[in-house]
Amino acid sequence: MIEDPPAPTEMVYPLSPTDSGVSRETTPEDETPIAAAAAAAARIPRGPTEMWPRPVSTRVLTVANQKGGVGKTTSTVNIAAALALHGIRVLVIDLDPQGNASTALAVPHHAGEPSVYEVLVNGQPLVSALHEVEAVPGLACIPATIDLAGAEIELVSLVARESRLQRALTVLLQEAEAAGQRFDFVLIDCPPSLGLLTINAFVAASEVLIPIQCEYYALEGLGQLVRNVELIQSHLNPDLAVSTILLTMYDGRTRLAAQVADEVREHFGSVVLATAIPRSVRVSEAPSYSQTVLTYDPGSSGALSYLEAAREMAHRVVSPAEGGATA
């Protein structure tokens, strides 16, 4: 007589995304009780926040890369937030018509809102479009609206078209310092192109921060970007230099990411930050809540990586006499 097969063991399935309230795009580690407890512990305040050294004078950095999707805007807003959370006053200028930096910082940027467009095309002062970021004390933003999409064409016929942002920024920085509210860092988020908007950013800055995605295509455009920086140095801004390279979307499981990182470090040396930003769902989720990852999920790997990258940038400007590292 053939016995009936044993009844299958009853399987217990996890709650659906609707029941749990947790996005199914989160990593498996985020769903374990241990990881949840660790993340909660990371968010608990542990006494006074460490204050990072302020630079002797304002550092103006253009965050640029003509390749899209390498993390320019994400790096701009998260580094700015990390610096501001540690006692450094920061201004973000959104020079991308998409306005993604403005979205991440919860700054109004609908059509008709005073923005960097009026500054570049109509000559209005930057302070007329300045917003303090409520979620991060010490952080301010000049938003971009969709009007900026036509600025490339409108700037062509204007006098001194390449230096309009520089002149407006110089006035703002002087007024802020006179009022005792000096900006320590200015980060200019550029569109993924090398047009007049990006040229304005290069002329206004003294440093270039280049985010590089750890993939092969990112290396192809890097040489062209460096050549464009050299052209700006020769003709419009001799003080401009590539001071910082940040590796983004690093996936330690792939050999390609390690090879790209090694090549970039070999060619650019100490300019490359020691910290690489890993791929992180939390970093991608944060803008949908109009937040940076530093406020959205401070205990995530992405937040901790951006925090460490910002720490490197802050301490690079301290002189040996003050007990810190030099650039």
Image (spheres, rainbow, N blue to C red):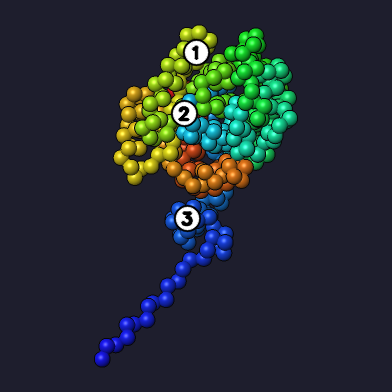
Which residue: 64% across, 11% down? 157
Q: Quadrant of residue 58?
A: top right
- Mark 3–mark 1 Cα distance, whole angstroms, equals 45 Å
Mark nearer the N terminus (3 vs 1):
3
The part of the image, by quadrant, that contains residue 137 is: top right
Quadrant location of residue 279? top left
Q: Looking at the picture, which amino acid does disc 3 mark?
A: Asp
Q: Residues within 10 Å of mark 2 (few under 14, many from 20)?
A: many
Q: Is residue 237 above or below residue 212?
A: above
Question: Where is mark 2, residue-wise?
Answer: 67
Against 190, residue 249 (above or below) is: below
Q: Secondary structure at mark 3?
A: helix
Q: Which residue is mark 3?
A: 30
Circle 2: residue type: Lys
Mark 1 residue type: Ile
Residue 47 position in % (x across, y down) = 57, 46
- Sequence-wise first label, 2 or 1: 2
Question: Which residue is at the far front?
Answer: 1
- Report how far apart the C-alphas of labels 2 and 1 lie in the structure: 19 Å
Residue at coordinates 47% horizontally, 37% vertically from top-left?
308
In three-dimensional space, the C-alpha distance between marks 2 and 3, rounded to whole angstroms, equals: 31 Å
